[in-house]
Amino acid sequence: MMKRLILMVMAVLFSGLTWAQSPTKNTSNERGARVDDTAPGRLQLSAFGGLSMPMGKYKNEIGRAKNGYFGGLAIDQYFRGNKWGIGLDARFLNHDMRKFDSVFFDNGHIGTTYFNHPSFQHIAVSIGPTYKAGSGKVDVEAFLRGGLLFEGFPQYAQSIYVNAASGPPAKLFDTYYTSNSKEKTRSWMGLGGIRLSYALSNNWGLFAQADYLRAFGKSFGKDSSEFYVTRYNEKKALGTKDVLNVKDGQLINLLDFYEEQPITQKTFVQAVNVSLGIKYTFGSKRKPAPAPVTKTVAPSALAAPKDILVVVKDKQTGFALSGVTVKISRNGIDNASISNADGQAERIKAAEKGTYLITAVKNGIAAEPVNISEQDFNNAGNVIYKEIFHDDPRFTLIGETVRANDSSKLPGIGTVLTNTGNNRNMTQISDAEAKFVYQLEQASDYHIVASQAGKFSQTESVTTKGLDRSKTLYVTLKLGVSNLDAGAVFVLKNIHYDFDKWDIRADAGRILDNLVNVMAQNPGLRIELSSHTDSRGKDAYNLRLSQQRAESAVNYLVSKGVARDRMVAKGYGETRLLNRCANGVDCSEDEHQANRRTEIKVLKF
C-alpha cells in the first residue's frame, strides 16, 4: 500500500510538471492573457487545515491511530518567472488512538490505564522545492519537503486485575504496554503533495491540498524516532468462566493463557492529509504580453472516458450492502472507498479506457472479484455499471445505545455480546452515531449488555433461531442505558424461579453475571436487591418466599466475588404491587407477571 501511494504521488507530480511545460517564454494571467515568464518572483503565504488519515502499522495493530485533524502554515518564495520556488511548511497533527476494551474473567478483569492524553500529537517543520503551473485563474502547485518531526506519543498499559477479598481489585501483571524511553521525541521526515488553487483576485485565492507525510530513521541523536509497544501474546483468550490463581501476590497459572516471553513491535509515523485553505500572494499584477500564434492540432481518435459505478450486494438476499471496502485497481493504483447505504462505492469519473479489477472486503471476508475490460468502454452509455456480491453466511446485528428514559442517542458506550451456546464474548464501543455492529452466527442465542463504569443496562436477548438468511440480513436492537445515580431503581428483566423455589437457575445466573460486572466496574456501588411476588397466595407465604429469593440472588453474587457488605437482600412479597391486581381482583396472567419481579436499588454511588 505504501509503495502504491508513493508511486501515485510521483505520477501526479510528473503529470503536473509535464502539463506545465511550454515552448514559449509566456504563461497566462488570471484573465487568460499571455504574460512574460521573466516576471519577478512573488512571495506566497498559505493557511490550511483538514483531515489527517494515518496509514500502515501506525494506523493498524501497533499505533492504533484514528483519523484526526491537522492545520498549518506554508510560505513559498517563487523565483523569476513564478514557476519554481522554495517553500517552508509548519503544521500540527493530532491522531487519537483507538482505546482498548475491558475483558472480564471469573475473578477479575483486564483494563487499560492511560498515563497521558491517548493521542499522537506531532509538529512538523519542513523545507523544499515548489513548482507551479497555471491556466487562467487555476494554478496547480507540486511540492516536496524535508525536515523535522517533533513527535508526541501516548503512554498506556493494559493490566490484569484480580478481585480481592476486600477493597479494589489488585493489579498483578501488564500484558500490553508502550515501551518508548520518552513520551516526546524527534525524527527526520519527508512531505510531498499537490495543491489546486483558484484565484479570487490578483492577491487572494482558495485552494484544496493533498499530501503524504512520513517519518524516516530509527533514531534522532540519542532518542528513538519510532513508536514502540511490548506485548505478551495470548495462548488462549480469557473467558468469563476462567480463573487466574494467585499465590503470594503472583499469578501462578498465567502461562496457561500467555506466552512466557514478550515481543516488542514498532512503527514510524505516516499519514495522508487532505485540506482546504486560503492563500495571499504579495506583489503587483502580472504584465500581459502579446499572445503567440498557435497551431491547432486535431486530437487523436481515442475512446471517450467513462464513469465507473460499482454497487455491492449481499449474495444471499440481493440487498444493497453498506460499509464494504471497495477497491477499483489499475496499473498498481487503487481507488479505495466505503460503500454507502445504497451499496454504492465512490464513483470514478472520466476513467480512461483500460482494464480494471474490482475487489470488495467486509468483516474479513472477500467477495469474488469483478473485471472491467476495454470492451466495456466501447459499449453505449457514459457509465460502466458493475455489481459485486459479498457472501457472508452470518446475520448482522445493528444496535444503538440510547438513554433508557427518553431513547435519545448515547454514543461512546462499551457493549459486550455473549454467545450463550459457547459463552464467547465480543466487545465494541458505540460510535459517534451511537451505533454498534456485530456478526451473528446462524441458529444461535445471544445476550448483550452495556459495560461501562457509572452505567447500567438490562441484559437483552437476541436470537437468529428461526431466521432465514436468504430473506433476512439485518437484526436490529436498541440498548437502553441508565446512570447509576443514588436512589435509582431498576427491574432486572428475565429473572425467573421455578414454582415454590428460590434456587438461581442457569438462565437467571447469566442475568446476574451482568450485575457482577457492574459491581466490579463501580467499586463504590452499594445496592438493595429485592424480590417481589404477585398477590396470589397467602401474604405471609409470599413475604417469606420473596425474602428467600432475594437472599439467593445475593448469595450468588457473593459466590462470584462481590463483597456481601455491599448488598442488602430484601423480600417485599406482595406489598409493592405495580398495578391494580391486589387480593381478590380478577387480573390477567400478564398483569400478575408485571408484579413478579427482581429489582435493584442504588443505595450509594
Image (cartoon, rainbow, N blue to C red):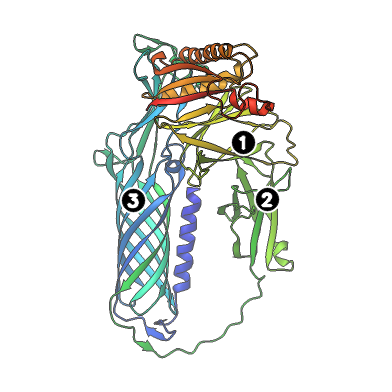
Q: Amino acid at mark 1?
A: Gln
**Separation of marks 3 and 2 at Cα, in angstroms:** 43 Å
Determine the residue located farthest toward the front in the rendered image: 584
Tell which circle, 3 or 2, labels the residue nearer the N-terminal end.
Answer: 3
Q: Is residue 562 above or below residue 304?
A: above
Chain-order first, disc 1 or disc 2? 2
The mark closer to the camera, 3 or 2, is 2
User: What residue does disc 1 label?
Assistant: 439
x, y (%) of residue 69? 39, 53
Badge 3 is on which residue? Answer: 189
Circle number at residue 320:
2
In the image, 121: left or right of 27? left
Q: Is residue 280 left or right of residue 62?
A: left
Which tag, 1 or 3, sits closer to the chain's start? 3
**Local crowd at mark 2 within 10 Å, few (<14), some, or many (≥20)?**
some
Position of residue 387 measured from the top left corner of the image (x, y, whole percent): 70, 53
Q: CA distance from mark 1 to mark 2?
A: 17 Å
Q: Amino acid at mark 3?
A: Met
Q: Secondary structure at mark 1?
A: strand
